[in-house]
Amino acid sequence: MFAVKEYDDGRHRQSNYRIGAMGQLAIDGGNPVRTELLPYGKQWIDEADIQAVVDVLRSDWLTTGPQIGAFEEELTNATKARHAIAVNSGTAALHAAMYAIDLQPGDEVIVPPMTFAASANAAIYLGGVPVFCDVDPETLLIDPAKIPALITKRTKAIVAVDYAGQPCDYVALRDLCDRFGLKLIADACHSIGGTYQHHPVGTLADVTCFSFHPVKAVTSGEGGAIVTDSPEYASRMKRFRNHNIATDFRQRETAGNWFYEVVDLGFNYRMSDLQAALGVQQMRKLPMWIWRRRLMARKYNEVFGKSSFVKPLSTTSNGIHAYHLYVVKLALEQLSVDRGQIFRALRSEGIGVNVHYIPVHLHPYYRETYGTHPGLCPVAEAAYEQILTLPLFPKMTDADCEDVIAAIAKVCGAYAK
């Protein structure tokens, strides 16, 4: 049974749902739980954010200016890493990380399939080969026990994807990297603000990558960053983001010098000062926003932990889950329809559910280029058929959470076997 509070503010329409007595589904012509779609994620921009961007617009530097250093300092303060390198996307961050560890053509990188394609694509950009390792069925994090069988003489690195915001088992992963002489890259695009065994995300791997897309914990519009304790890696990535030129324009302007040299092939992955100024303000709110995400996740856990129809992913007691996403598995054996129909019905109720992710190895490019196929990662493939991402972002209200709970109850109740 699900119970929700009664309210009606124009967007929220139903109240006190009980399984089996909830009225006609909106997809079948009934009244929706909400008349305004609740997205699965959304940025929170306030006046301080806006003013910071306006101040940059009125300044002399729109890109590669003083706000880049200020943003990087916020990142090192928050993560306790020694170096931060701001770039223009999480994908650029992953690409730069691969370059930092000197990935060479033919080198293999072990990566989980339950992630966005950029986690694997970044290796391919440098001629590397992604090798997919299946995930733990309860957390959907890379399964360290499955990694040794995939290691060859060409293996260079392991990519640990902190899926949904929960840090991976970095003790086990570090042990594997030390034993086999591998590099450890953390794809922490979901987990900034999280911790593992009291250590902040950002200090758990050789290099750690972040994304600042609008649905992430903090945003710079588009943007990303890498943090590391290695001065060598930091130096390589700072050049890499700027065409591998040894100095940037601001450095040359300050020195009154025009001369520059391209020392290796690089890319234009620079972040603008506009983005960095927004990022500075957003980072200062990160602790509060992680607290709000965890509070809402707790509300969901209290209800869905008792549900016959949906099951939250398992969490460990090793640290702080950043809850970029709140993912549940549908108990399809208890339902008369598949995930696709539940998805459509919930969207009709005004709940903007999503699915994260189609396993990367099932995409046509990987199947055609690398010969990946169904059955390669059976745990991830089975989970994909069941998972739904529910709305969760800091600006959500209690009423928004209750709408989600009510809609899940309404839809699952209607399709119960």
Image (tube, rainbow, N blue to C red):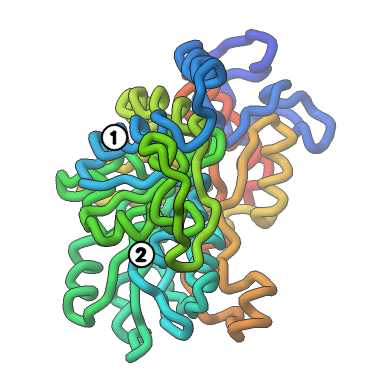
Give the percent coordinates (x, y) of residue 276.
45, 32
Pointer 1 residue:
73
Locate residue 118 relative to residue 23 in the image: left or right: left
- In the picture shown, does residue 357 fall above or below 11? below
- The residue located at (77%, 32%) in the rendering is 26
Q: Is residue 333 visible?
A: no
- The residue located at (31%, 52%) in the rendering is 167
Locate residue 195 relative to residue 241 in the image: left or right: left
Near-viewer residue (244 or 111): 244
- Whether residues under marks 1 and 2 lie with C-beta atoms below 8 angstroms apart, the answer is no
Look at the numbered disc 1 and give the secondary structure of its residue.
helix
Alpha-carbon neighbours of circle 1 within 10 Å: few (<14), some, or many (≥20)? some
Near-viewer residue (356 or 62): 62
- The residue located at (70%, 37%) in the rendering is 347
Pointer 2 residue:
100
The amino acid pointed to by label 1 is Glu
Marks 1/2: CA–CA distance:
20 Å
Q: How many marks?
A: 2
Locate residue 32 relative to residue 173 in the image: left or right: right
